[in-house]
Amino acid sequence: MKLASLKSGGRDGTLVVVDRNLAQAVAVPDIAATMQAAIERWEQVAPALNAVYHKLNAGQQPGAIAFNVDALASPFPRSYQFLDGSVYLHHMEKARKARGAAMPANYKTEPLIYQGLSDGFIGPTEPMPMPSDSDDADYEAEVAIVVDDVPMGTTAAQAGAHIKLLMLLNDYTLRAITKTELPKGFGFMQAKPTSSFSPVAVTPDELGPHWDGTKLSLPIVSKINGRLMGQPNAGVDMFFSYPQLIAHAARTRKLGAGTIIGAGSVSNQDEAAGFGCIAEARIHEEMGAGRASTPFLRFGDRVTIEMRDPAGNTLFGAIDQVIRAEGS
């Protein structure tokens, strides 16, 4: 099934069930008022949500309204925890080369993962506020999962059962700030502003054979101002799987229901697939022409990220955002 959150209803929005074609939606306050309330009682509420979903698809659900992406908040307007990994090693190598950093010694035995801002995500079509036009803002096209309660010590073999939803993710990065912030050795802070997610969150069964329980094997398409940046396949060259990321994060702590985990900017070794962020494109240009020609994001630029099935149907809807100055 497909779920979303309306902006109305307070900081956690209002949960709606959305039909498969992203044409109709309906609020379900008698089942769960918010997405967070649903994920915390997933085993109890999922059957009822699924029944509404089937009625929506059959055109038989009372109270259905037209799906309006501009009325949506992030599927999770805020989360108790947002973790993001970097499991596409081709991307990691290029991103680190761009800022003159070496690869960590254990990058092939333990996934890199950080804890990011989670107290407020922006909606999928809301403008993305930035503090400056000179911080070298970059997008990162990713696939994220959402888990229910994960006990401490959960193994990778056990972790797959905790994956309840998937979303697209734009994990913005301010590249100019990473060059001075990360060498301090204490991780991201200023270089990672808020993130955005796709209009809808999708249950794994909606993805058919493209989801194998560990990864999603479909291209993720990103554009800047309508120009195609890339369409790398999210299931290709993924060095660590989502269950492995969950197990790594849960080694010393439990993960609360609604924890969101990204896998990093999707990147394929085959550069004919293009890029999932600007930094990779610039490194590619520097290696070929001796200089980078693709600029980082500036005020007024529009970033879109989407994933379609082989028949051309949008699965999550599109993240479609304009970069603007904070306060403008």
Image (cartoon, rainbow, N blue to C red):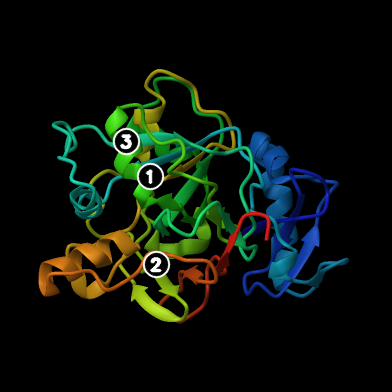
Residue at x 35%, y 51% (from the top left corner): 175
Residue at x 71%, y 61% (from the top left corner): 72
The residue beneath circle 3 is 182
Pointers 1 and 2 in contact (C-beta within 8 Å): no
Question: Which quadrant is home to the N terminus?
Answer: bottom right
Q: Amino acid at mark 1?
A: Ile
The residue beneath circle 2 is 220
Q: Is residue 100 or residue 154 the one in the foreground?
A: 100
Q: Judging from the image, what secondary structure is the residue with disc 3 in? A: helix
Q: CA distance from mark 3 to mark 2?
A: 28 Å
Q: Position of residue 174 (x, y in %)?
A: 41, 50
Q: Position of residue 294 (x, y in %)?
A: 31, 72
For discs 1 and 2, the disc positioned in front in the rendered view: 1
Residue 240 is labelled as: none
For discs 3 and 2, the disc positioned in front in the rendered view: 3
The residue beneath circle 1 is 177
Q: CA distance from mark 1 to mark 3?
A: 8 Å
Pointers 3 and 2 in contact (C-beta within 8 Å): no
Q: Amino acid at mark 2?
A: Ile
